[in-house]
Image (tube, rainbow, N blue to C red):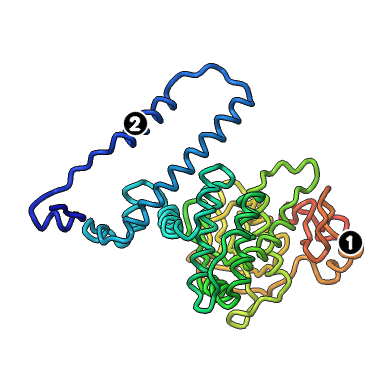
Amino acid sequence: MSYETSRELAAHGLQGVYAPDATLAALVSAVDAAGVAPTPRRRAWQLIGDMKLRQQCIDRLQLQQARDAAAFAATEEYEFHGSASPADWIRHNTKVSGMSASISIRVGEQMASLPRSVVAMREGQIGFAHLALMSSTAAAVTEASDAPPFDEQPLLDKACDHSVGRFSHDCHNARHAADAAGFLSEQRTAIEWRSFDMNPVAGGFVLRGRLDSAGGAVLRSAIEALAKKQGPEDTRRAARRRGDAVIELANHGLDAGTLPSQGGQRPHVQVTTTLETLMGVVGAPAGGMQLSEPVSFATVQRLACESSLTRILVDAKSAILDVGRATRVPSAALRRALQARDGGCIWPGCDRPISWTAAHHFKHWARGGPTALDNLGS
């Protein structure tokens, strides 16, 4: 009598013992030998040949893994081992990501309906990544209630000629053509999954979020437009430029005055500082910034250069004695003069329009620099 699952074995007080068959054991030994055996220095064309052949072997192994993953998913074995799903068990026990596990199961489930694509992959005409995209498309199309039978040949022809990235677009187009309503439903679901978090950590924030494709494209377009190098002296790496672009977007939104009011006030960042900190006096405390850790005197000076200032007098016990009126530095008239004179950002290589600039003192006013046209630049 044979028992198919661990649950059946356990019911009879038995436990399965795994022993790989001779072919698989020989494969593992061959892989180990190929990986550790010293090889002489090879020419570039030899490296190219080896990498292509090795990837074909990897793809074939992934196909076999997908076949077994689908067979495993068709059982309840994962429940016996305490996993939430077949993909969850595969993720933990084969040391892959949850997405890789799900893709493996899906490819295995669709193999029978994609015979020509499977043959093409075995022959090296397409890769496993192409087959994974094909499988996802086939599954989505066949799940539609009024969809015709899935024909793999048109997509297979494109897969043989296109890169994985371009073939992904081919699959999206085929999915939309076969089931536009389902395609739209998936995009609406992706919008519902939008999220964005800012978690404070030592020295700043860690950002984490998720956007749908269209929303992400909008944000990326705005960031990339602001993340260009500003001349040959701009040595910032690309990731740093994109980070600066995000801050610039936020600053422009605050400065433009188009954001919704909060408590009757325009959204703003409040900075609290002593006069000594503002002047950079040695021994002065750091400045206080709303929603932030304390900031340095240089940051306080930079922010004060383009903000409204409110004077607050306190006694020795920090009790407020007087609150002055907020004043703008520089004035609206002076700002208009700057706009007429500079026409845009005056930093070498920067092409920001005047509406995206802020007035800066060449000699900071906290160090005696006057708020005058000849001491200001956009």
In which quadrant of the rendered image does the C terminus lie?
A: bottom right
* Residue 246 appearing in the image: yes
State the count of labels.
2
- Distance in Å between CA atoms under marks 1 and 2: 73 Å
Position of residue 123 relative to residue 218, above or below, is above
Is 306 situated left or right of 300 in this image? right
* x and y, in percent, of residue 84 in the image: 30, 62
x 35%, y 46%: residue: 94
Is 350 situated left or right of 269 in this image? right
* x and y, in percent, of residue 295 in the image: 57, 54
* x and y, in percent, of residue 277 in the image: 61, 54
Which circle, 1 or 2, is nearer the viewer?
2
Q: Earlier in the sequence, mark 1 or mark 2?
A: 2
Identify residue for label 1: 343
Quarter residue 10 falls in = bottom left
- Badge 1 density bin: few <14, some 14–19, many ≥20, Cα 10 Å: some
* Residue lying farthest to the left in this orientation: 13
Identified by mark 2, the residue type is Ala
Q: Please tell me the numbered disc located at residue 15.
A: none
Identify the element where label 1 is drawn: loop
* Residue lying farthest to the right in this orientation: 341
* Residue closer to the observer: 363 or 147: 147
Identify residue for label 2: 26
